[in-house]
Image (cartoon, rainbow, N blue to C red):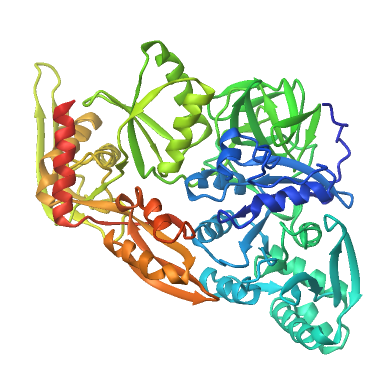
Amino acid sequence: MKMKNNRNQNIQKLRNTGICAHIDAGKTTLTERILFYANRTHIMRETKSKDGKGPVMDFMELERERGITISSAATNIEWKDYKINIIDTPGHVDFTMEVENALRVLDNAVMVICGVNGVQTQTFTVDKQLDRYEVPYLIFINKLDREESRPLEVIEEIKEELGKNPVLLQLPIREDGEFKGVIDLISMKMKFFQGRFGQKIVEKEISDEFIQEANFHRELLIDSLSLHSEKLTNAYLDGEITEDKIETAILESTLERTIVPVFLGSAYANKGVQLVLDGIIDYLPNPTEKDKVAHDLENDNKEVVLTPKPDKPTVALAFKIEKNQYGQLTHLRIYQGKVEKGEKLYNNRNKKVLKIPKIAKMHADSMETIDYVSAGDIVAVFGIDCAIGDTLTSEGKYYTFRDSYIPDPLVFYSIEVKKAQDKNKFTDAITDFVRQDPTFRSYYDEETKETIIGGMGELHLDIYLQRLAREYEIEVETSSPRISYKEKVTQETDFSYTHQKQTGGRGEYAQIRGKIAPTEVDENIFEEEIVSGVIPKEFIPACEKSFFNCLEKGKLVEGKIIGTKLLLNDGDFHAVDSSQKAFATAMKKMFNKYYSRCNPRLLEPIMNLSVVTPSQFRGNIITIVKQHRGDIQEVKVEHGISKIKGSIPLAQTFGITNQFRSSSQGKAEFRIDFKQYKFLPKQLEEEVIEKFKSRKVMK
């Protein structure tokens, strides 16, 4: 389908918005309702619809089967003469990289929080991601149609647990326990959503039953805003508060990220969604209101503030890659300049010139082709060879952006192709997966002769295994899950090492002295205190690089070494035989020799744990957690529902879901996300090391 040209698009009326949440908070349902109210679709689909078609945005077969979002999906709508690009992101922690890549290019977001379960584990993760990229956002407290919902208590959780300043813009209207609508604390009107799909908004004066509570919360709203808006404070003191002044204060404070506006409703019950769309327009930034900084590669990575104007040199970032029937589909955010069909852009990573053959606006898995896109917009292009994180620019502008935060994999499988004729297809598939998802890793272990794949969890890798079978028709065998253990020294040790090699011509000579010690944090540190030139400065970088290379693979189970500091404070060199290579070799051999003397220990990944269960099963759940070396930090009991928070070793989580289900009649919800690395108990450490050695011998 061909779209109309958007050369005259008003950037002030453009919003780039992400929808993000903990899994099952109702994020995808909210997106489906948004599409319906904006006339982008004409039927509302549910995450687990009986016809098997599922939501528009969950277009992958696996997403519709499982009823979860696996991959972020883009769409675009028009609302009250505004254009909104929307990216619906996954809520499961295993696919958090999809959220990371989306939020780094978006100007704003809507965070969905369940009105029953409140702040959950992935809510924390999303909050950190929003902070990392300084994204202004609003909150939609969802599922108020459920009798046990508790929006005012959730507001307190947002304050206490996320450390945010939520500003409530609405109150729920409940009659006989049923959620009917909201009271708008700005206009001081009751708003009801009528019609079969809640498409008609009816305003009424606030009834006597609710007026006292409404006045109280409006005063709270004005007090909260006055702390961040001098203009509103003055208006309040002068008795000149107006709706416009309140809205201006909300906008300015949201852009400064000193407040988070909070909306209420139920996406499933078709209540409150249109007001969220109004909030995106009224209170969240357009592309000109959120600065984006690039780095000039030819000017010592000096920061450059980009200007979202079409007459500037083009700067665009590739933030998502897919492979479909058309080939590689690359999603771009255009920060500056423009992109036209047939235009040539420069890839600053591989130094290649790319010709743009086709541009499209995406609507889930369908597209609408365009010939031109201007600064501030988000599009997809076909037929170019690039990777996630590549910066594309007009030739002569050599810019780049800081990298996304990419967490290390936590779970590994060895994987083997069943049929020899599938090996080439398998290589192509794994290459595609690695390009599409930076948290999916693959390598070949030369010692064990195994291909290893790594990911964020069992579900993450299971999805890719199913994609191998369905999309590439490849049968594979896998090992049981393996944990990503890390290693850390626990004892300070002095070292002295001399590397000397004579081959008849110029030899190699390097002498290094210093100490290896554990750090209090997991960071690795290289320091040098060389005086009097005993080691020339030109050899120090080689020592540092060699040290960090040594940390990539420890001696216990070949885990990455963390929390280790090396101090280089003495040494010697030879005027002819010393070189960078000689000092790098000395560092490598020294570390191999002295590592075991530092009493290295294994660390295992510990996960944050969140279980929500009917209270009658609380004791069963706590018992299971403790039996699996888990630790309970907090239990909250409200309205017959228990929220259990704690931590548990990742190694203990495999298969635990079935135990939770069987002990709670299938009613317990279980979520984990990474917390920290912690020393493995000594007895278990010995078992893990022995298993690792046995596997090496068997191979």
Q: Quadrant of residue 476?
A: top left
Residue placed furthest toward the top: 421
Q: Quadrant of residue 136?
A: bottom right
Point out the image quarter for the C terminus. top left
In the displayed structure, would residue 290 be above or below residue 76? below
Point out the image quarter for the N terminus. top right
User: Taking 370 as reference, is 675 left or right?
Assistant: left
User: Taking 387 as reference, is 177 left or right?
Assistant: right
Residue at (81%, 28%) from the top-left corner? Answer: 370
Position in image of residue 328 (x %, y %): 61, 24
In the displayed structure, would residue 373 be above or below residue 427? below
Q: Quadrant of residue 289?
A: bottom right
Position in image of residue 20 (x %, y %): 62, 53
In the displayed structure, would residue 264 be above or below residue 224? above
Looking at the picture, tell me which residue is in the foreground, 126 or 142.
142
Residue at (21%, 56%) from the top-left corner? Answer: 518
Looking at the picture, tell me which residue is in the foreground, 139 or 241.
139
Q: Is residue 573 visible?
A: no
Position in image of residue 233 (x %, y %): 77, 83
Position in image of residue 464 (x %, y %): 47, 33
Residue at (34%, 48%) from the top-left corner? Answer: 654
Looking at the picture, tell me which residue is in the foreground, 675 or 546.
675
In the displayed structure, would residue 348 be above or below residue 309? above
Give the total of numbered labels: 0
Q: Is residue 620 visible?
A: yes
User: Taking 564 as reference, is 392 left or right?
Assistant: right
